[in-house]
Image (spheres, rainbow, N blue to C red):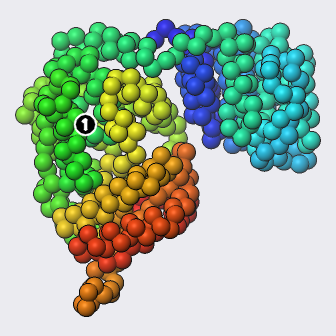
Amino acid sequence: MNSDMIIVLDFGGQYNQLIARRVRECNVYCEVHPYTMSLDEIKKLAPKGIILTGGPNSVFAKDAALCSKELFEMGIPVLGICYGAQTMAHVLGGEVATAPVSEYGKTTVEVDTKCKLFKDVHGTSICWMSHTDYIAHMPAAFKNTGRTENCPVAAMANEENGLYAVQFHPEVLHTEEGTKMLQNFVYEICKCEATWKMDSFVDTAIEELRAKIGDGKVLCALSGGVDSSVAAVLLSKAVGEQLTCVFVDHGLLRKDEGDEVEAVFGPTGPYKLNFIRVNAQERFYEKLKGVTEPEAKRKIIGEEFIRVFEEEAKKIGKVDFLGQGTIYPDVIESGLGKSATIKSHHNVGGLPDHVDFKEIVEPLRMLFKDEVRAAGIQLGIPENLVYRQPFPGPGLGIRIIGEVTAEKVRMVQDADAIFREEVARAGWGKKINQYYAALTNMRSVGVMGDGRTYDYAVALRAVTTTDFMTAEAAPLPFELLSKVTDRIVNEVKGVNRVLYDCTSKPPATIELE
Ligand code: XMP
């Protein structure tokens, strides 16, 4: 890809991906690399600018993550953010200390608008702060270009050498003029051209895939989710019928979803590819019989999926490439230390052990989710598929608490279809990020007509979130909840009670298992 590039050197801050996304929103290509990347490797990438991220530690802690002084002498502009700003100060001979008053949250900042980083920015605005250390003394040749009440060096610059530092977080939208500051860095300071756009990405990716695959055969697991769908369409545009997609219907999909996927990718759909649908419902239900422990269910579903996929692959025989819908956050996350496993996530992209292929192709490897969606639209994939809400790999298997049976799947599918239909009708679909019905394992007494019932309770879950790491329960109007409840208890046999989950994440998670 021949775009100008900015690299983000990651010191372990929580906003590392966000910085890269913001840069890409300026239509400038940006990659995240660990702070340990060598100067030679950096030179090879020839970035037009470097951004140092925040990080959880102190620059004066034992074994602190630091970069070398030479990084600042390469003639490439550098922007240090938060811990990155302190690193710049420390490495270049300034002094970092624990601030007498730490700042957290929205803070008024005053900046020097003559500094290129603050061109067209108001002299006083709100920024987002989160720090306990601060720059107590600037290195020689730096000018103080910003301050808050408790942080005298909230920004500093050595403009002659293209070095800029801000204690606050321009990438967080609470910083009112943060986007402008990042634009100033990439356009004014690094002189990048705004060439990173999804239409050119799609054209280039298709050409690159053609060159790489030649007349080879590609096999791809298709789940109907956004990532695997966009990857499959990109591959099919590149190599057409050399691509075979295997879609495993594990019987844990939403109502009618299997048929919807087939309608788009199957023989009557708009794409020319070999589509194989495997109806493996019974197999999965059999394996899940009597299993109630959430992690055990997840593992069984993940493993069975791979087995089914391998069996199909064996029928096809040797292929040259295995296509996967890996996206950039997966790449970044797998390159860093993993935090505690709360749930073992199963994605349809998991690697099979016994498929005969030479190489993996991952056409979306460098894209963030919003870019994948933009590429999907560019490729003409229907909007309802491109803007689909996330759906976990183990599907309804983790939305049925306790043992999974075909009968329970039917109940949860029907309840969920009603909930989704009413949410859409009430115009709430675009306001919430994920919503579904789950089947609790609780049965309770009710009365229907003149008779006693002893049936299941459905839990409705709807959340708003930006990153799915934290989430709030959505304040759905009571009339909507009440309408959904009436419909579910009347239309779904076996359900006599509907509950709304008001818990945020944390302490709950988005899925129930
Ligand atoms: P939790 O339940 O961990 O979910 O708060 C966060 C987000 O991840 C989705 N999720 C999964 N996605 N495979 C996936 O591809 C999985 O195994 C899986 N488990 C949870 C969940 O739907 C939510 O969007």
Q: In which quadrant of the rendered image does the C terminus lie?
A: bottom left
Q: Is residue 203 left or right of residue 218?
A: right
Classify mark 1: helix, strand or loop.
Answer: loop
Could you tell me if residue 131 is visible in this image? Answer: no
Question: As displayed, is residue 15 above or below residue 89?
Answer: below
Query: Between 428 and 375, which is closer to the camera in this rendering?
Result: 428
Q: Position of residue 403 (x, y in %)?
A: 26, 69
Residue 322: x and y, percent?
24, 27
Residue at 77% across, 47% down: 105
Left or right: where 224 falls relative to 152: left
Residue drawn where x is 32% and y is 68% of the image: 487
Ligand 1 within 8 Å, label 1 CB: no
**Residue under the image location 12 percent in, 48 percent down:** 279
Query: Residue drawn 39% across and 12% down?
Result: 204
Extreme residue in the left direction: 315
| Residue receiving disc 1 | 222
In the image, is residue 195 above or below residue 156?
above
Amino acid marked by disc 1: Leu
Is 194 in front, or is 220? 194
Image x and y of residue 152, in percent: 92, 35
Expressed as whole percent of the image width and height from the top left, the position of residue 251 reads: 20, 54
